Image: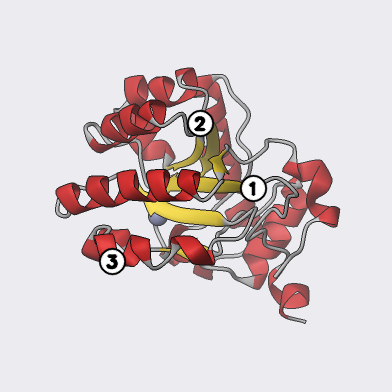
Amino acid sequence: MIDKILGSCIRSIPSKEKVLYLTFDDGPHEHCTTKVLNLLAQHRAQATFFLVAAALQKHLAVGRSIVSHGHHIGNHSLDHKYHHFFLNDRFLMKWVRSAQDVIEQSLQVQTIGFRSPLGIRTPHLGIALRKLKYPLIHWNQRFFDTQRGLPRKAIENRVSHFRSGDILLLHDTHTKHHQSFFEGLELLLINAQQAGFSFKAIPNNLVNNTDKLPIS
Ligand SMILES: [Zn+2]
């Protein structure tokens, strides 16, 4: 019922394989993103980075480095502003599309879809994305890492709750909880891999597959 009002939203991508989809929002960030890329490479993990177009314009080299490491790229809006959600679908179409254009032209890649700032969904956004045939990709596992980093306890308790195809929300803009974040991220990678999961990038053909995916 709620989807009829807000439009569809992908929160997980069920798979027979034991796979998890790490996603990092709000970058690229000058220092944090590079450290995330190094850690992912060390653990042979692929991920998806939902970029803010304005941040990408400031840190283009970091954005290119994400692509050269083989990760996928999503659209996390032009400017990460929330008040746009009060505007109509024609404005939102332009807002989403202009971020898509900046990101795709800067990096010469296809973006896999849109993730809205703060996960906000409105009927107008649903209409705009449907008209653009552009999937809305959120998450079903979050860690509140911008507020508290990634404390060891939070990770140890979570891995047993992961299901194949879960989409994990993290951020690659840490300065305040930097140490806790990187220690927690490494623990997450190690523990999940020990439990048999591999980390992959969200596929970039979801536009054609959204009918088959569970929506919420
Ligand atoms: Zn964000």
Among numbered discs 1 and 3, the one appearing first in the sequence: 1
Seen at 81% across and 46% down, the residue is 209
Quadrant containing the C terminus is: bottom right
Q: Position of residue 55 (x, y in %)?
A: 34, 37
Counting every numbered tag in the picture gives 3
Secondary structure under tag 2 reads helix
Q: Is residue 91 above or below residue 154?
A: above
Q: Which mark is residue 153?
A: 3
Compared across the picture, whether 30 is left or right of 86 comes to: left
Identified by mark 1, the residue type is Lys
Mark 2 = which residue?
Answer: 103
Please identify the residue farthest to the bottom as the structure is shown. 1
The crowding category of the residue bearing disc 3, from other C-alpha atoms within 10 Å (few below 14, some 14 to 19, many at least 20), is: few
Residue located 57% across and 37% down the image: 201
Residue 42 is drawn in which quadrant? top left
**Disc 1 target residue:** 18
Ligand 1 resides in the quarter of the picture at bottom left
Label 1 vs label 3: CA separation? 23 Å
Please state which amino acid type lies under the numbered disc 2.
Ile
